[in-house]
Amino acid sequence: MRDHPTYPLLTPRGWLVFALVGLVLLAVPAANQWAATGSAAHLPDYLVPLIGKYCTYAMLALALDLIWGYAGILSLGHGAFFALGGYCMGMYMMRQIGTRGVYGNADLPDFMVFLNWKELPWYWQGFDMFWFAALMALVVPGILAFVVGWLTFRSRVTGVYLSIITQAMTFALLLAFFRNNMGFGGNNGLTDFKEILGFPIQAQTTRVGLYVASVIGLGLTFLICRAVVTSKLGRVCLALRDAESRVRFLGYSTTGAKLFVFTLSAVLAGLAGALYVPQVGIINPSEFSPANSIEIAIWVAVGGRGTLSGAVLGAFAVNWAKTWLTGAAPEVWLFFLGLLFVAVTLLFPKGVTGLVQQVRNRLATRAIPRQAEGD
Amino acid sequence: MKQSRVPRRGPERGGAGQPADAAPQSWIRRAAAGLVAISAFLLIHVSASAATLEDLLAKLATDSFAEKVEAAEALGSLGDGRAIPALRALTDGRLYARKDAGPVIEDGSVFRDALTRQPVAGLAAADLDKVRANNRLRGVLEGALSKLSLFSDVKAERLAAARDAFKVGSAEMATTLERALATEKDTDVAAAIRFSLTAAKISSGTPEQRVLSIRELAGSMDPQVRNLIAGVRNDASQPKEVKDAADTALAAMDRKLMLSGIAENLFQGISLGSVLLLAAVGLAITFGVMGVINMAHGEMIMLGAYTAYTVQLVCRALLPPEWVGSYLLLSVPIAFVVAGLVGVLIERTVIRFLYGRPLETLLSTWGISLILQQAVRSIFDAQNKEVANPEWMTGGFELIGGFYIAWNRLYIILFCFMVLGAIALVLRRTAFGLHMRAVTQNRDMAAAMGIPTARVDALTFGLGSGIAGMAGVALSQIGNVSPNLGQIYIVDSFLVVVFGGVGNLMGTLVGAMTLGVVNKLLEPVAGAVLGKVVVLVAIILFMQRRPRGLFALKGRSVDA
């Protein structure tokens, strides 16, 4: 068998950009903590968790881009993996409240006392330990993705059918988590967190710590995704996206490849969710709503599907626009988002990165004849 | 059960006039004894009542309250319907005593004799003395009237009294009921009396009578009867055979109640299924023909519902009152046209540029759905709107014990099948339908045969959206209209399409009905939410066996 061409994880220029972006992102808390209040370089406190939230969204976008942009599987249920990761972290922080809750019960979270529960359900056991909760935040979405993926890929459910199935999955979870007797706080979800790993959750230093963790998480996610797409598996995935039957006829196990990428993507989404919840301070069933999951797709599409940097860019751009518009003119936001969906699919199918590439190509083709003239 | 009733009736009736003979006898002897007893009773009773009714009425018009009470009580147990007007008149203060004859009743401007009810002329005001009532007397009068209503001339009154008697269930009431039954000629009233009499026997009869009565009532679906028998069952003082009979009866009743519950769930399920069908059939058509998932389909439903709301407003403003009820019929075609035009517009401006890219179509139509939702919210505000049921759609009727059918649900089921029939006709009998089916089966070949596929696409999208609009009119009749109306049904509609298979009306029909019925049957067992989750999981598992749905389109095409 011929060796396939090997790709570097990142080109030297790529590493440079990676480091620069990392530095800029890490400069945010520095500007908040060390620049004097009132100076031009000082960032207000609220921006730190906000940009931290964007970082976790970018991780989520990367996870979806991996599965959609590279393997051609449009999952409309990635919000569910994100929310499950978030719930795991939320359960840990719920247990950390201890006797500081409204009812002062050391063993049970407030909502369970309210529901007259006598003891902790079995699936809450172990969530008082951080390492266990962190592990579960990755394992639970992973297992769900593995099971759903195995069931669907095995029977060759593809295209829009798969999208609908994943949407139904997140819809089912939405309904289930709304139920009080599921034991996840029902409608209100989990909130009123006090501390994480012993640090008070409201303190600005804790927020900066969480922010740094999110930036590191984003960097790690980017590198993991990059490692996958530059590997041989990544090539198979690309081929899958473009002509699945042909890949199968060539003797590749498409089910295995898809299953691996789908599960990995769900784990990354779970990680994003686990970092997201401590920064926003609440997790409730609305995170499972199908609309949230579709929105992730538009982040990826805006940035440029099939390019990892595009996914990050798109997540930041769309969410920044959302923060700004929902504050400035709430009724315009849905018009804007809707138009974004239509415009991106219709006019810029490759997103911003594609647009940049196009412009660059055009400049290059124009440059060649000019060079020829010069000669 | 009927057999036990026939021989028993003899001694029972006899029991009204003389104590019932409880000793076991052959039914012929009992029937013979009963006949004798009845004739004897009737003879004595009629002559006695003719004699005493007049006396009692006169006694009612005396000055002494004690005597009036006595007379009212006697009249109540006398069981003669002719006493009713006098008793009522006394209650209302319209009874007057005459010096030389029986009392008269004031009836508008004339006075009538209390017994014969003939107008009495030439009465001077001085001759008349109003008969007064106090609270104690009023109480007695009410009791007497309630017993006497069983003997009233008006059928509705007798029927109501017979039904009310069920709640009393005393031995005294049983006696009155038996007497009423003996003279009752109307079969409906007789049945009601017999029913209440049997119930009274459960509370007050001999153990044998109780057992028989319980057995007889076991066929009833009335929750009151169930409570009565359950009360007997839980009463420790009852003999064992009575309790056993109560047990058997309760089991039978519960079985029946369960069956009627299942029937009700089934109806609810079919109702939900027809709603899902209306919502999903347009989706199935567009998906089948164009391979396009239209995420804005739910918003077409919403547009249809808002069209109905607008038409309702316009009709109320412009039409004469007797025509206002027609707004619903009017809004069906209007909703079809409005949603259909919006559909064609979407197809021409967005979707046709995205053929062959189903995932992108999915995203862009989602964007359109957001725009439409926000547009409606901006125009009509975010409050829920109500499209009122026209008169012929309000209320409902009870089919069998406790199984209630609401008109609006029934009409929606009918409407749904009419729409389905119309679509089937279009698909099977028109050139457009032929083209549509050809494009569904093989787009390239259809184009090669000269079918204008682009136009077929646009019209199909319009048709699918128009049907969704009509679905919206139907939905406006069973719930409020809000900008998120479409979102509620969209996931379910997708599941119907995925489950039933695309491009196939039969598949959509079976898919929608199955989902609707299964959902509603699971609801009492698992709860509404969990039931839905179970259905979703079941569909995901189902897709293992049939990834292309229940009725997959068989074709030779293979994806690239």
Image (cartoon, rainbow, N blue to C red):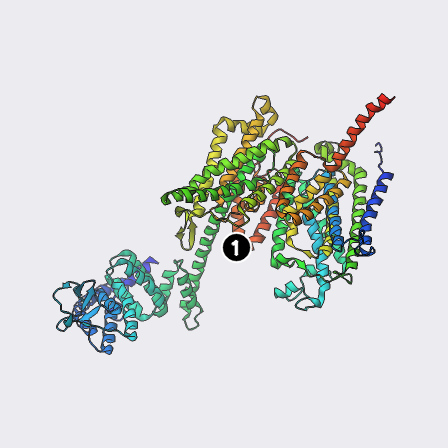
Residue B254 visible in rendering: yes
- Residue closer to the observer: B175 or A129: A129
Q: Quadrant of residue B325?
A: top left
* Residue B393 shown left or right of residue B63 in the figure: right
- The residue that disc 1 covers is B524
Vertical order, A123 against A304 (above or below): below
Q: Residues within 10 Å of mark 1 (few under 14, many from 20)?
A: few
Q: Which residue sits at x=85%, y=22%?
A: A372
x, y percentage for residue A143? 71, 49
x, y percentage for residue B156? 29, 58
- Residue closer to the observer: A291 or B257: A291
Judging from the image, what secondary structure is the residue with disc 1 in? Answer: helix
Please identify the quadrant where the C terminus of chain B is shown: top right
- Residue closer to the observer: B104 or B215: B104
Please identify the quadrant where the N terminus of chain B is shown: bottom left
x, y percentage for residue B42? 20, 65
Amino acid on which disc 1 is placed: Pro
Q: Chain of mark 1?
A: B
Q: Which residue sits at x=58%, y=53%?
A: B530
Q: Quadrant of residue B285?
A: top right
Vertical order, A149 against B125 (above or below): above
